Structure formats: structure tokens, C-alpha cells
Amino acid sequence: MSTGVIIDIAREVIWTVVKVTMPLLLVSLIIGLIISIFQTITSIQEQTLTFVPKFLAIMLVILLCGGWIMGSVSDLFIDLMKQIPTLIK
């Protein structure tokens, strides 16, 4: 197994991780930004205020995109398992 193959596999894994986590991270970032702006405007300095909206938004994204996330991860896993015989040679 050459270093080029390892780099290709690592690139594919990293790209899948980025692609799968991006919706969750973007929703968390947007909700956090909105709550921070709201806290700044209203002068509310409660640190736990951002937790519940972020948690609910992330759960909603997981419910909506969970099938796609599992499909992407399982496709990657299946592709890697199919490559094992050629990598051993």
C-alpha cells in the first residue's frame, strides 16, 4: 500500500466528515450568533441561554438530515470495505 493510496483514503474520510458535520455546525453557529445579538441588545448576560435553542436546533437538523448523514457515512464505510482486497495485494 503506497502513501498515495493512504492520502486518497484520508482525503475521502476527511471530506466526508466535513460534509456530514457542516449542517450541524452551521446551524449551531447561526443560532449562537442570533442569541448573542439578542443578549447584547437586551443586556441579558445569562450564559445558559444559548444551550437550549442550540440543542433543539441541532436535534431538528439531526431529525431532518439523519438519513443523509447515515447514508454518507455508510457509503464511505462500504467503499472502504470494498477497497480492502485491493489494498492488501
Image: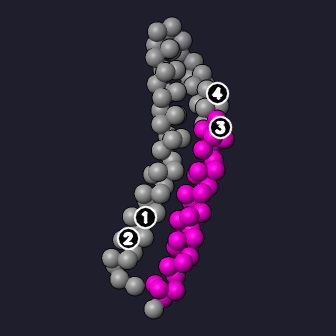
Seen from this angle, which residue lies furthest bottom?
89
The image shows residue 89 at horizontal and vertical percentages of: 45, 92
Q: What amino acid is labelled 1 in the image?
A: Glu
The image shows residue 49 at horizontal and vertical percentages of: 60, 22
Residue 75 part of the magenta-drawn span: yes
Q: How far, Cα to Cα, is label 3 from label 2?
A: 32 Å
Q: Earlier in the sequence, mark 4 or mark 2?
A: 2
Q: What amino acid is labelled 4 in the image?
A: Val
Q: Secondary structure at mark 3?
A: helix
Residue drawn at x 53%, y 65% is 76
Residue drawn at x 46%, y 17% is 37
Q: Decide: is 57 above or below 36.
A: below
Q: How far, Cα to Cα, is label 3 from label 4?
A: 11 Å
Seen from this angle, which residue lies furthest top?
42
Residue 23 part of the magenta-drawn span: no
Residue underneath mark 2: 8
Q: How far, Cα to Cα, is label 1 from label 4?
A: 34 Å
Residue underneath mark 1: 12
Residue underneath mark 4: 52
Crowd band around label 1 with a 10 angstrom C-alpha radius: few (<14), some (14–19), many (20+):
some
Question: Do the residues under discs 1 and 2 have CB atoms within 8 angstroms?
Answer: yes
Region of the chain picked out in magenta, as a range: 60-88
Q: Earlier in the sequence, mark 3 or mark 2?
A: 2
